[in-house]
C-alpha cells in the first residue's frame, strides 16, 4: 500500500484534505504520481455527488507502477489523463465515437463504474473510495486504467498538460471534430471563459477568417483577442437571448450570420442563442453542456441549420491528444497562457473561490 493525500468530497457540498491508501496496480491498471491537476466547475459540482469521492478529473503526472497487462506505458513515463476511457469494442466505439462509449464512460456508460480501476484499490478510512470521472486527480496518487493515460510529449509542463484532459479538449475538439470548421469561415463564440478561449483557439488553428467573441466582460474579451478573436461584442445581461448581439453578428457577416456558432456559457437561457447567430445551413454547437429543459423558438432552426451537442469534443484520446501536443510544440496552441494561477492542494478552497469569481482563465493544483 502507498499513502497519498487527496481532496475528498463529502457529498454534501464540502470537501477536506485527507490521507488515503492506494494499492499496487494489477492487470491493466496504472498508478500515476500526479504532478498537476486542473480545477473546473465540474470539480466544484462533484462535492454534491454523494461522497466520499476522490475529486479531480484533469491530471498529468509520472507513471509510478503498472499492472502485468500494461504494454503502452512504462514506469517513469510522463502521461496526461483522460476521462474518456473507451472500451473500443462497443457499438459506439466501433463507430469511432469513443467519447460516448456505451460501457466505460462515466457519463454515457451503462455502468459508470465499469471503466474504473478497482474501486477498492484506493481506501479512505479503510473503505473503498470512488474517483471522480474514474480518475480522481486531486490526489498525489491516482489509480487508473491504461486506456485513461496518454504518453506526454517532450517540453510540455505538467501544469499545462493537465488542462488538456477536459477544457482544452472540449473546446478545440468541438471545433475540429464536431463542427469540422473549414478554413476561411466565420465563427461566433458565446462566452470566453476557459472553454470558450479554447474554442477560439480551435477556430484559429482550423483557419477561421473571422472569429467573433461575445461576452459581458470587457476584460475577458481583451483576453479573447490574445487567443485569436478577430472581433468582439460586449453583450448586456439585459439582452434577452442575445438578440441584439445577434444583430451585430449579422452586421459583421454580410447580413446573413456566421458559418458556425459555439455556446460556451452554460447559461440555460442562452441555449438557443447560437442558432440566432448562424446563417441558413450554418452549424451551431452547444459546447457547455446545458442539462435542463429549455424552450426553443423553432423558427431559429430555419433553414437547414444544424445544432449539435457533442460530448468532450468527440475526443479520441489516443489520436487527439498527440495532435494537441503538436499544436503546443508549434506554438499554435496556447496552454501556458491559460494557466493564470497555481495552488497547493491545501489551498483548494481559495482556488474554488477564484474559480467561482471568474478570476482565472484556468487554475491548477501543483503537487
Image (tube, rainbow, N blue to C red):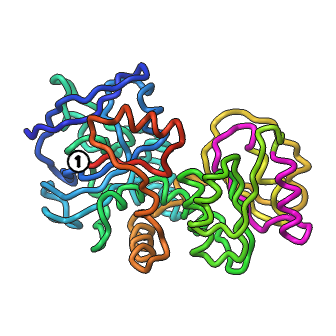
State whether residue 56 is above or below residue 172: above
Residue in the image at 46% along x and 63% along y = 316
Residue 167: image location, x then y, percent: 49, 53
* Nearer the observer, 105 or 275: 275
Q: Is residue 35 shown to the viewer in this render?
A: yes
* Nearer the observer, 107 or 22: 22
State whether residue 22 is above or below residue 128: below
Residue stretch rendered in magenta on the structure: 242-270
Mark 1 nearby-residue class (10 Å; few <14, some 14–19, many ≥20): some
* Image side of residue 347 versus residue 363, left or right: left
State whether residue 226 is above or below residue 133: below
Residue 9: image location, x then y, percent: 35, 27
* Nearer the observer, 289 or 199: 199
* Image side of residue 278 versus residue 88, left or right: right
Residue 262: image location, x then y, percent: 68, 57
Q: Is residue 265 magenta?
A: yes
User: Which quarter of the rendering shows the N terminus?
Assistant: top left
Residue in the image at 45% along x and 55% along y = 90
State whether residue 191 is above or below residue 260: above
Residue 186: image location, x then y, percent: 75, 71
Q: Secondary structure at mark 1?
A: loop
* Image side of residue 289 versus residue 103, left or right: right
Q: Quadrant of residue 239?
A: top right
* Image side of residue 109 versus residue 121, left or right: right
Q: Residue furthest left?
A: 1
Residue in the image at 14% along x and 55% along y = 64
Amino acid at each position: 500500500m502507498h499513502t497519498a493525500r487527496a481532496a475528498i468530497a463529502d457529498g454534501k457540498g464540502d470537501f477536506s484534505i485527507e490521507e488515503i491508501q492506494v494499492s499496487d496496480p494489477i492487470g491493466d491498471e496504472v498508478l500515476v504520481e500526479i504532478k498537476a491537476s486542473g480545477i473546473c466547475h465540474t470539480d466544484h459540482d462533484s462535492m454534491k455527488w454523494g461522497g466520499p469521492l476522490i475529486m479531480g478529473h484533469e491530471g498529468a503526472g509520472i507513471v509510478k507502477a503498472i499492472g502485468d497487462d500494461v504494454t503502452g506505458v512504462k514506469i517513469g513515463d510522463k502521461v496526461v489523463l483522460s476521462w474518456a476511457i473507451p472500451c473500443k469494442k462497443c457499438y459506439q466505439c466501433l463507430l469511432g465515437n469513443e467519447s460516448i462509449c456505451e460501457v466505460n464512460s462515466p457519463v454515457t456508460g451503462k455502468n459508470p463504474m465499469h471503466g474504473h480501476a478497482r474501486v477498492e484499490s484506493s481506501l479512505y478510512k479503510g473503505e473503498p473510495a470512488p474517483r471522480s470521472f474514474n480518475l480522481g486527480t486531486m490526489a498525489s496518487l491516482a489509480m487508473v486504467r491504461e486506456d485513461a493515460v496518454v504518453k506526454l510529449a517532450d517540453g510540455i509542463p505538467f501544469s499545462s498538460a493537465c488542462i488538456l484532459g477536459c477544457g482544452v479538449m472540449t473546446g478545440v475538439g468541438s471545433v475540429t471534430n464536431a463542427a469540422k470548421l473549414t478554413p476561411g469561415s466565420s465563427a461566433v463564440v458565446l462566452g470566453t471563459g476557459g472553454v470558450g478561449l479554447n474554442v477560439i483557439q480551435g477556430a484559429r488553428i482550423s483557419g477561421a477568417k473571422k472569429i467573433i467573441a461575445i461576452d459581458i466582460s470587457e476584460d475577458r474579451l481583451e483576453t479573447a483577442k490574445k487567443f485569436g478573436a478577430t472581433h468582439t461584442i460586449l453583450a448586456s445581461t439585459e439582452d434577452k437571448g442575445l438578440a441584439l448581439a445577434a444583430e451585430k453578428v449579422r452586421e459583421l457577416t454580410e447580413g446573413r450570420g456566421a458559418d458556425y456558432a459555439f455556446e460556451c456559457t452554460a447559461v440555460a437561457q442562452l441555449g438557443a442563442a447560437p442558432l440566432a447567430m448562424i446563417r441558413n445551413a450554418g452549424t451551431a454547437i452547444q459546447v457547455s453542456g446545458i442539462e435542463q429543459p429549455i424552450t426553443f423558438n423553432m423558427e431559429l432552426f430555419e433553414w437547414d441549420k444544424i445544432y449539435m451537442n457533442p460530448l468532450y469534443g468527440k475526443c479520441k484520446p489516443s489520436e487527439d491528444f498527440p495532435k494537441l501536443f503538436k499544436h503546443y510544440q508549434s506554438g499554435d496552441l496556447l496552454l501556458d497562457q491559460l494557466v493564470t494561477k497555481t495552488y497547493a492542494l491545501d489551498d483548494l478552497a481559495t482556488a474554488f473561490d477564484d474559480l467561482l469569481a471568474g478570476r482565472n482563465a484556468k487554475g491548477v493544483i501543483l503537487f
